[in-house]
Image (cartoon, grey):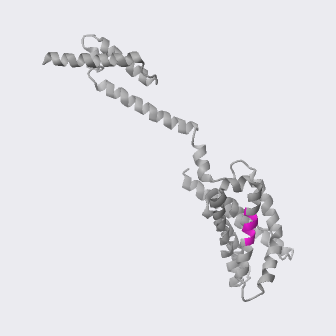
Amino acid sequence: MSKIQFKALDVLAFTALAAVLEVVFLILFRSMNSAFYVSFAIVFSLILMIRWGWVGIIPAVVAGGATIIYDYAVGIRDSLQWVLANTAGYLPLLLGLLLFKLVGKEKVVNHIGWRFLYVLLAFLLVDVTRTLFFLGNVDFGRILLVFLVYDLINLVIAMALFFLACRQKDFVTDMNSYLIKINQGTPESNFRDDRRSTKDDYATLEEMADSDEVSDIALLDGGMVTQDMLAEQERVRRKMEGQKETKYDKEREAFRKSKSKDEKKGKK
């Protein structure tokens, strides 16, 4: 599975779960004539934003849109302000990305104070933005207070879920860094490295086999193998086994090259 496929499935899973739970709890609490309902939309988006960045906003927006679609399905006609409040009202969650830039994702996940601030700011920003969509129709202070009071329970639930999720190993984490980490030092990555190393060794062996000193013809010509041929074979063997050249090997190679030059001059 590629990284893009894994990312798409991860976002889809969070989004689908957020949308289903949003509608289920809306139906449940309406059946009890409650003025509010439990929502996991914000906390799901907060977790996914740490995992993948800006695409983490998708679960909250889709979950809010799912409640609007449900209302239309059962014959409830929501106002334009309510539609915007439950969809575009979640967009300020993206400001959490600035917090990542300022302090880093690791500190937000691992430091209790930053965890608390991350979730609290998210709810405050969303409630203020939702209230702005009702300007001109109702008193700003009153509607903001309503949103804040109704969201107190959701804030407590979100805090508990986010703190619990952060305690799970490699769950609330930057997935780009995580995927790099788990693909380093694994049997698969070691196998790839070994293949590359082996390929280089065979390439060296092929080069030596093409040379005059260690060719098949030379080895089979009358069954004669010179000392230089044996030395060259030993050098290749040591290279294949990862052994370094000794001082003796270097001196022998220098002597061989010098002897070769002298022979060529003698022929001239």
Q: Which residues are magenta?
A: 118-124
Find the residue positioned furthest to the bottom: 136
Q: Where the C terminus falls, by quadrant?
A: top left
- Determine the residue positioned at 20% across, 16% down: 263
Residue 75 lies left or right of residue 6; in this view the side is right
Residue 13 visible somewhere in the drawing: no
Splitting the image into 4 quarters, where does residue 153 fall?
A: bottom right
Residue 175 visible somewhere in the drawing: yes
Viewer-nearest residue: 203 or 221: 203
Residue 227 % position (x, y):
31, 11
Residue 55 lies left or right of residue 191; in this view the side is right
Splitting the image into 4 quarters, where does residue 206 fall?
A: top left
Find the residue positioned furthest to the left: 268
- Determine the residue positioned at 75% across, 63% down: 117
Residue 194 lies left or right of residue 164; in this view the side is left
Image height check: is 128 above or below 136?
above
Residue 137 % position (x, y):
74, 89
Residue 8 % position (x, y):
59, 59
Magenta portion: prevailing SS class: helix
Magenta region includes residue 50: no
Image height check: is 137 above or below 58?
below
Image height check: is 19 above or below 214?
below
- Determine the residue positioned at 71% across, 81% down: 132
Residue 193 % position (x, y):
49, 36
Find the residue positioned furthest to the right: 32
Total labels: the figure holds 0
- Determine the residue positioned at 55% across, 38% down: 188
Magenta region includes residue 123: yes
Splitting the image into 4 quarters, where does residue 240 fall?
A: top left
